[in-house]
Structures are given as structure tokens and as C-alpha cells.
Image (tube, coloured by chain):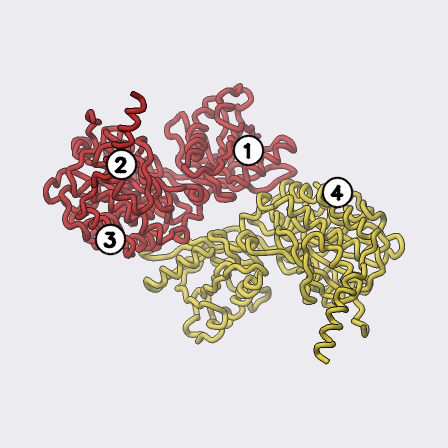
Chain colours: A red, B yellow
Amino acid sequence: MRTLAMALAALATPALAQVPLLSPAERDVRDRIIAAAQADARGYRIIEDLTTEIGPRLAGSPAEARARDWAVARLRAEGFGEVRVEPFSIIYWGRLKERASVQGRFTQPLMVAAIGGSPSTPAGGLTAEVVRFTHMDELRAADPATVRGKIVFIDEVMVPSGNGVTYGATVAKRRACAPVAAEKGAAACLVRSAGTSNRWPHVGQGARGAAAAIPKAVIANADAAQLTRLMARGPVTLNLDLQTESTPNAPSGNVIAEIRGTEKPDEIVLVACHLDSWDNSVGALDDAFGCGVTTAAARIATEVAGPPKRTIRVVWFGAEEVGILGGIAYAERHKADLPKHIIASQSDSGGAPAFALETGVGDPASPAVQAMVEALRPLSIVRAGNAGTGGPDIGPMRAQGVPVFDLEQDVSAYFSIHHTGDDTLEQVDPASVRCNSAAYALMIWRAAWTDADFRAKPVAR
Amino acid sequence: MRTLAMALAALATPALAQVPLLSPAERDVRDRIIAAAQADARGYRIIEDLTTEIGPRLAGSPAEARARDWAVARLRAEGFGEVRVEPFSIIYWGRLKERASVQGRFTQPLMVAAIGGSPSTPAGGLTAEVVRFTHMDELRAADPATVRGKIVFIDEVMVPSGNGVTYGATVAKRRACAPVAAEKGAAACLVRSAGTSNRWPHVGQGARGAAAAIPKAVIANADAAQLTRLMARGPVTLNLDLQTESTPNAPSGNVIAEIRGTEKPDEIVLVACHLDSWDNSVGALDDAFGCGVTTAAARIATEVAGPPKRTIRVVWFGAEEVGILGGIAYAERHKADLPKHIIASQSDSGGAPAFALETGVGDPASPAVQAMVEALRPLSIVRAGNAGTGGPDIGPMRAQGVPVFDLEQDVSAYFSIHHTGDDTLEQVDPASVRCNSAAYALMIWRAAWTDADFRAKPVAR
């Protein structure tokens, strides 16, 4: 029986593989999309122009507001029929000054950056002894008497990983430190930079709320190692001077551009990036790259395949960096429409060429998914699993059932650039922009020109 | 005749090669020096301890003074019989604030650093239009009317070069810009960073004197490219805010440690590094590396070969970065002794393993030089030419006839680190410290345990 089953399987597999999932006409469209993407300059131009003409664009800042106006004008100029801003309010937070200096016989400055949301220290800084932990669990287990009045230093190191799993693990301390340290009576939190940059502090958002309201900063990787070496020579007292500002009702917003569907305009194929960046760079990879890629992809698909059946919606989310506030605002505002969202996918993992398709769909083996995989195959994009997230701003809508797709990228190099001063246009490879524009264009095409249902659960086959 | 000459040459070469330039006993010393260096941890420990315990040590600052005290104690602890400071005074200069921001519709910050010696701008900065040149000759040829009242921007790019020749060519503008721009009535000078760092401004010293006394700054490579893209979109006005301080009589000094010669104590074999660093990093490669290497080398040679005939003098120069002031002070103070300086060599070219010996001697083919080349051969160090400089602080004594040796290093990677915030202990490869300690120990041995005269001109051979 076993042998017979195996023989049948052996017969079945080549037979299945011979079923053409894309028709000859569709293969022609696919090839023309790839060719058009390879000749496209729009994606890179959007990245160059956004980063050059706006520069850094911190959530809630005047620069982010200028970026929204810029985006509306640019998306109209790129030929999107409907372009609008969906505004929302956020708490704006900005850094004014950040300085750390070792006191006593080894006096020297260390490179730090305030964590998003950090309150100010008293003017002139707070001065306290440093107490070191190598990870959060050590702090959680610590006797409050050893921590009270001190600067807690979480010295957990991130090693590079191609899929970013070590980033997720080690960045958690940036949010976790302050609430735990504050409860034990600590004066401040200092956490080793996530990411692998040597000297740029890896900036980012911290936990919000009264329970996390102690001064908190990241310290550059080299400076964390320096501090650890100094502590090996005896107790270290640090002066930590963080001056920050905050505004309760600052404007942000999502910029939305559409190519309306001809047959089912209320059905939405959503591709996205985020418009805001951190304040220490122009955010070329994070995430102007995603805006260039997904916007060019929507245009390329339409120019090759004609008007789509369903509506293609490109969203440039606001205020992603400070807590995916754009994604949350979108899911709230569009709650009633989310069942009509066919797929959603955000490009926000750096600038490497996509190499795998991870789905987050009802039936990962459906013919519609298989056809998408076949469409992507000429780009050397392989099939991964069905645990996709869709990207940070997609999370809130995915939680409400929207099917998602991830085009996975190698992030080995990304986390030495991400959230640092080094995230400049020099990091963007135009060839990679074209590759990923092709991949997104193919994904959009397989979703917006078909009746595919990525939500449906598997049927018995 | 030609054929006969060639045949004779063919005979002569192997014959020459068979002359043993090092005796069996000397080969044994050589091998033991290399083995001792490969097992040595002192070089790296000096680098680690100096950079950790002092941190940045700008010329003339309290940190450089602490570094001198540290160096005296450390060199004594390392077993040098005589250790002293030769003090001198310098003009101290330090940065207090440096900020540049594009004005108008593309408003954004750019990353700049004041050039050493720059005066302050008025409080709040000076605001002027930028006028761009791609190299100094364009500025020199410019009509003063096009420059008057403006911020001159020299956008000359350095490409990497293994031997550093492009650094020398492109760093010249840092000194050259202000005098030329000031004479034409410019408001300020902004020069693209030398070196290849993307976002760290490459700091450094500018020209001194009244003719160069306009505000002057370097702009990071990425920001220079950004400024050029902005200028392609229309005239750019910049606010440049540099606040600096200066003190006329600040202390500096050279730290000198000796192992006295037994037979000819007045003859000096000098190896060197510099103790000061720029203020944006701990100067691990520039030049703690050189201090660790040359100091360990002197100890290793002595421990293997016993007391030297001639005196080994290790000099940790002060105030190199701000104009080789330590080297100038040394040559002045020791003018009368310089004829007794057998050789001088400074390690100050980054952290790569030495690969070639470039001499600056009277007779580059002398048996003494050939013996030194043979000593270095097991380290894969090849013979280069006779245009050696000895290193920056050696220049003033070389000008007075002191023979010099350079152990050349590949600098392809160095100029992305040099004078930037990235020059931290992480850049130091302990294996390279050991390699170069071996090379310097062999050089010292061939100079201090022999009667070699590297000054003598060739005799007819």
C-alpha cells in the first residue's frame, strides 16, 4: 500500500506541475511587467527626491507635514487618480540635547541618544552609579535595593542574522527596560543599541505611559563595550543629560493614492510603505525605499496590464516609527472596509532584493497563491511559509483578518544602517529598487486583475 | 657581449643570494623575536587600556594631560629605565557647537564639523548662499565677485586607495580653502570630508593665521552629495553655526621612554607613535595602535636579544593632530643630538599588518639595509623604495638628516575610520598588533644591536 501510494504520488506530482497556472497570455503579461520594471526609473527617483527635498521627517514634525504635502503632489504627478491624506493626531516627541559623561578619574564622553518618549533629566543631567545587566531577565530578577537610584544598563548584544530574528529579540529591551527599572526605583535606563552599527546609537521608540517615565537612552555599541570595560576597572558614575520636548496634539497622517478598479472598485489591493523617518538621517532605506518600490510597482502593473478590476491602494503611512500609529489609525478608520481588503503588504525591511514570498493567507496552497508564486519565479523568489506579517503598519488590519504577503529580504547588512545616521541615499541600490518593483508589480497584478480570494480556508482537495 | 653580460648576471645573482646576511646566531634571534611577538599581549593591552582609561585626548586638553601622566606610569611599569615628559605649549582649540541647516523650502540639517582652528560664527550662525567648486583650482580661478559674502563649498571626492595617495591629494583642501576663500571675500569655507566615511565628518586641522581666519567646516560625504543634489534644484542658502574656543598657552608634551644602550648610549634608535587623538573618538587606530606596537616591540627586542648596544628611545608624541607640534618641538629641542639618531620610525597609518619596508636612508642597498630586509622576510614584508618619510612627527628630524624607515600598511579600510567617530577599540585586530610588533622589534634589533650606519652614502661597489 505504501509503495502504491508513493507511486501514485510520483505520478501525481509531475502531472500537477504540468497544469499551467499561468496561461500563455498571463505569462506574456508577467514577462512584460518584469521588463517594464527593469527599465523603470520612477522608484529610485521617488526615493532620491523624497530624501533630498524633505530630509529627515520625524513623526509629528513640520518636516513630516511637508513630506505629506510633497507626497500628495508627487503621487498625483505619478498619475494616481485619487490622492488624499487621512489625518490623525499624535504626541510629538523630539530630542534637544543628549550627553553622557563618565565621572571621576576616567572621565570621558559616551555616545548616547534619548529613547523616543524619554522625559528630560534635570538641567545639567542626573548623576548616578551604573548597574549592569546582560539581559532583561537579570533586571527582572534583581533585588530593588541593588537598582534604586542607579542608572540601569542593559548590555545585551545583537549579533547579525540574515532574517532579522536577533533584531526582534534584542530590540525588546528598549521598551521593556524603563517600566521594570522604574518599578524598582532606578533613576534612568541605558540600553545597548539594537542593530550592529559600531558608533551610531540605534534610535527608536520606548514604552509610553507613567510607568515608563524615567529618563532613558540607547548607548552606541562601541560605547556600551567601553562602559563595560570601565566597569571592570571599578564602579562607574555617569552624568546623563537628556533634554527632550513633547507636544500633545501634533498632526500626522496617512497619504493614500488609488488606481480605481473597473469591476470591483470597493475591493482593495493595498501596498504600503511609511513616510516618516527617524531624525538622525533621511531614512533612505527606512522607508523611502518602500515608498519608491510600491508606488512604482502600482504604476508598472497598470501600465502593462491596463486598468485593474479591483482598486489598487498605495498607502504611505505616517508615524510608523513612533508606534505604528498610522497603521492603527488606518485599521480604525477603515474597520468596516477591511473585509473588502483582498491583500495588504508593506515594504519596510531595507534595500536588499526580495528572495522569498511568505504568505499570511487562509489557504497557503490555493491556486491563487500558486499562481502568484509562479509569477514571481523568474525573479528567483522562492516560496516560504504562511506566517507572514505584512509589515508593521499592516499588523492592525491583519489582526482583523486581512490576508497579507511579505516579500522577504536579506537583512544582514540592514541592521548596521537602520535607525542610524548612516541611512542615506548612498545605501540605495537602484538595481534592487527595480527588482523589488517588479516583485510588487507582479503581486499587485495577481491580486487586482483576478477574482482571487486569499481569505478562504482550504477546501478538501 | 650582451649575451655574456646576461650570463654573468645570471651567475652573479644566485651567488649573491647565497651570501648569508644574517648569521645562524642572528637567524635564531630573529626567529625568537618573531615567536615572542606572536605570544605578546602587551601591545594590545596598551591600546585597550589607553583608549579605555583616557578616551578621546585632544591636543592641549585636560584629557591629553591625563594621558601623559598615564603614559609615564605605564611606560615605567613596562620596564623602561628612564621615562620623562618633554613639555611644550600649544594653542588649544576646541569645538563647542557645530550645526548647518539648509534654509527655505528644502529646510533640513546637514552634518558638519568645525575645522581645527576655525573661529566662531556670530551667535546663531551666519546665513549665506553656497557656491560650489569641485576642486581648489576652480576656486583659485574664480572671480571674487562670484564668491564674496558666500559660503564656499569644495566638493572634491576621495576615492579609496590602498596606499593612501588619494587621501593626501584630497585632504589638502582642508587647509587650502580658507586662505584662498578669505582673500576673495567669502563668508566661510565648507569642504567635503576627506576619507571615505559615509556620514561621519572627517575632522582635522586647518590653516593657521589671520589670512585663514574665516569660519570653516568639513561636511560629511553623504551630506556633501545631498547639498550638491539640492543645489541642482536651485540656489541653496545655508545657516552655518560654529562655536569654538581657543586658549593661547595650553600644555602639551612628548613622553619619552628609554632602554639605555650599553656600548653607545648616546646613539639613538627612535620608534614612535602619537599620544593625542581627535575629540570624536578614542583614537584606537590613530594612534593608540602605534603606541602599543612600538612600545611592545622595544620590550620584545630587549627581552630576546638582551641589553642593546645603542639606546632605544620610544616617543609618544603630543599634539600631532593639530600640526605635528610634538615632532617640531622634538627636532628643535634635540637639534644637537640629531646626528646621533641612527634611525627614526613612527607607526601612524592605521591597523593593518605591515607589508613593505620603505627606507629613507643614505644607501638603500647597504648590507645593513639588506640585513634588515632579510630579517623582515619571514613576516612577508617586501622591499619598497627609498622615499620613506618616517611618519608625520619624524618629518622635522628627517629634514635634518635622520635616516627613516616606514613599515607600510594597506590603508584601503583605514580612511573610512580615520578622524571619525568610528575609531574605536573594535577596529583593532590583536593579530595585526602582534605582526607589527614583530616587525618593529626586528627593525629595532637590526639598528640598536649593530653598528649599522644608515646615513652613509653608497660607496663604489
In the rendered image, which residue does mark 1 sit on?
A127
Secondary element at image label 3: helix
Task: Estimate the spatial distance between the alpha carbons at disc 4 and disc 1, rounded to whole Å.
Answer: 30 Å
Secondary element at image label 1: strand
The location of residue A37, given as percent across then percent down, is 27, 52
Question: Is A277 positioned to the left or the right of B292 in the image?
Answer: left
B37, A60: nearer the viewer: B37
Mark 4 belongs to which subunit? B
Neighbourhood count class around disc 1 (C-alpha, 10 Å): few under 14, some 14–19, many 20 upward: many
Q: Quadrant of residue B10?
A: bottom right
Q: Are marks 3 and 1 in contact (CB under 8 Å)?
A: no
Residues flagged by tags 2 and 3 on a common chain: yes
Q: Are marks 4 and 3 in contact (CB under 8 Å)?
A: no
Residues flagged by tags 4 and 1 on a common chain: no
Task: Estimate the spatial distance between the alpha carbons at disc 4 and disc 3, rounded to whole Å.
Answer: 64 Å
Q: Residue B73: which numbered mark, if any?
A: 4
Confirm whether residue B180 shows in the render. Answer: yes
Name the residue at 61% across, 47% down: B284
Task: Estimate the spatial distance between the alpha carbons at disc 1 and disc 2, rounded to whole Å.
Answer: 71 Å
Mark 1 belongs to which subunit? A
Q: Residue B261: which numbered mark, if any?
A: none
Name the residue at 53% across, 26% down: A149
| Closer to the eye: label 4 or 3 | 3
Q: Quadrant of the N terminus of chain B?
A: bottom right
The location of residue B111, given as percent across then percent down, is 45, 53
In the rendered image, which residue does mark 3 sit on?
A74
Q: Amino acid at mark 4?
A: Ala
In the rendered image, which residue does mark 2 sit on?
A14
Q: Amino acid at mark 3?
A: Arg
Q: Amino acid at mark 1?
A: Thr
| Closer to the eye: label 2 or 4 | 2
Q: Amino acid at mark 2?
A: Pro
